Image (cartoon, helix red, strand yellow):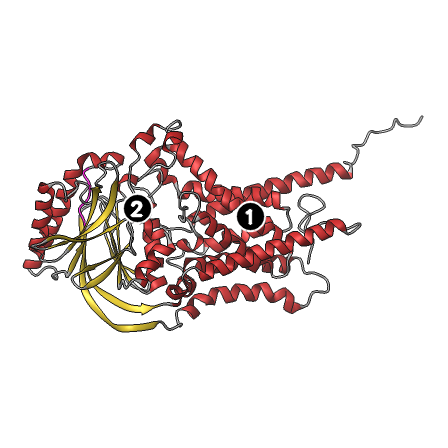
Amino acid sequence: MAAPPVDTPAEPEPAARSLHHARYVLAARLLIATGAGALLYLSFPPRTLWWLAPVAFALLGAVLRGVRARAGFGYGWLFGAGFLVPLLSWIGSFVGPAPWLVLCAFEALFLGLAGAGMALVSRLPGAPFWAAAVWIGGEALRSRIPFGGLPWGRAGFGQPDGPLLPVASIGGVPLLSFVTVLAGLALAEAIRRALRPVPGMSRRMAAAPALLVVLTLVAGPAASMVPVARTAPDRTVTIAAIQGNVPRLGLDFNAQRRAVLDNHVRVTLQLARDVAAGRQPKPDLVIWPENSSDIDPLRNADAAVEIDQAADTIGAPILVGAVLLNPDGKTTTNSALVWQPGIGPIERDDKRRVQPFGEYLPWRPFFSLFSSYAARAGYFVPGPGPGVVSMAGVQVGIAICWEIAFDDLVSDSVRAGATVLAVPSNNATFGLTEMTYQQLAMSQVRAVEHDRSVIVATTSGVSATITPDGTVTASTRQFAPGTLVDRTVLHSTTTLATRLRSVPEWVLTALGVVAVAVAVLGTRRGRVRPGSRPAGRTAQAGEDEDD
């Protein structure tokens, strides 16, 4: 008698296997894109893990290679969300979680656009170079729109401790970002070609991405050897930065404005006693932070008397951060006043780029429908000028708080004759978050970009003194009174970055746009050609063709 037939499991259909594979590949790419964004965040200060940035872009490049623009947009957005949500978490301490997450979701759209462009050019010869240029175009767009843009989190701002930093003196933050991104994308391509050698490809072609990685890594040391133009001999002055501290953390510190002014007067008077006792050198000029006198000293005699006392006792002009009421009786300016001993205010600089949703509220009636915070947003208006004041014969360039993030503002100050940069800031609103360290990193990059010493003075920390090579020579603790007295070198030099201004950014952006246009035209030709597959598209999810 014959044995009954035994049922054996049927082999999965090829289409089903392909579908399962595609799902696994999609899930992996989604996770890698988000995780790569988180790695980019971890590369930023206060950590000194600068090398994680190229790794993050290597992973992003691997995810984007060969996918369609629509998928590239999605992966780029996830990368942006993984990066910006933790990077900008300090905003949540200011306005709550909903506005913070909405802002991050919106800003990630710019990274999504960059991801779409990078996916399109990923099949072109020399793809890492073109993709890095596309990324710079995305940063340029995000730094300008909407409402003046949000340059926070550009790739170059995460490199103050890395060997690539000197590149900033050649082409500013855009070129520093470009080299950082290019290093990661070239690394990904070098690894891909090593793991999947292409038949018929010469060794020279296979080694090209590896050579590109090496060139990016030596770009920093090479840039440091480029000479600067010197228009006058260097000289040294003594500058003091005062951190008076605030009476409490958080948004409501402004409720005790007089206490903030008192604190800065008290610390300055203590410095004067230390000078008299020989414990500190006498400063030639003193920098107070932003909002050190939220009581308008031009309208309130009691505040003016206090500042007079501090300036007369220390015997040096003080840069006083003040909130001034305008003649219309409604709007205000965020100003820095030069307070001369025995005279009073003799010069002022008004903040040139005020912060949307903080210092002013765009579309106020509209946004008032969504947040109770709208009623607390300020009515600040921007001021004119290049951001330079004269103190004790020193031309001081001023970037008030977040102005340090904007290329044009800092360049204007240096080109107008600033021999030292002051960054008066008020970070008390953001508590013990990483915001102050991220801002300090920007100041370090600006020091190298323009070959200028930088003095950072904040109400609550971290205040710091920075040399022209980006080194932080001294700093204060957060939420503690402090004084930094520094023998500061004044340079009258001009770096290539100062002369070129935004030219490197526009050139790189133009190259990225042209590369995208070439990729799009190639895709259209592929669609017209019978039996061809459009460029930049895989037959199935996860499929990857070699060049």
Identify which residue is drawn at 51% across, 56% down: 509
Q: Is residue 245 left or right of residue 355?
A: left
Examine the structure image and report whether residue 527 is included in the region drawn in magenta.
no
- Specify the quadrant that holds the C terminus: bottom right
Could you tell me residue 23's position as x and y percent? Answer: 65, 38
Give the camera-side residue of 438 and 10.
438
Q: Residue at x 38, y 66 (%)?
A: 499
The reply, left or right, for residue 484 in relation to residue 97 is: left
Q: Is residue 245 magenta?
A: yes
Residue type at numbered disc 1: Gly
The answer to whether residue 533 is seen in the rendering is no
How far apart are the alpha carbons under marks 1 and 2? 34 Å
Residue 115 circle label? 1
Q: Amino acid at mark 2?
A: Pro
Magenta stretch, residue numbers: 242-247
Q: Quadrant of residue 393?
A: bottom left
Please state the horizontal and vertical placement of residue 374, each as a whole percent of the image.
34, 31
Q: Locate residue 283 relative to residue 504 in the image: left or right.
A: left
- Secondary structure beneath label 2: loop
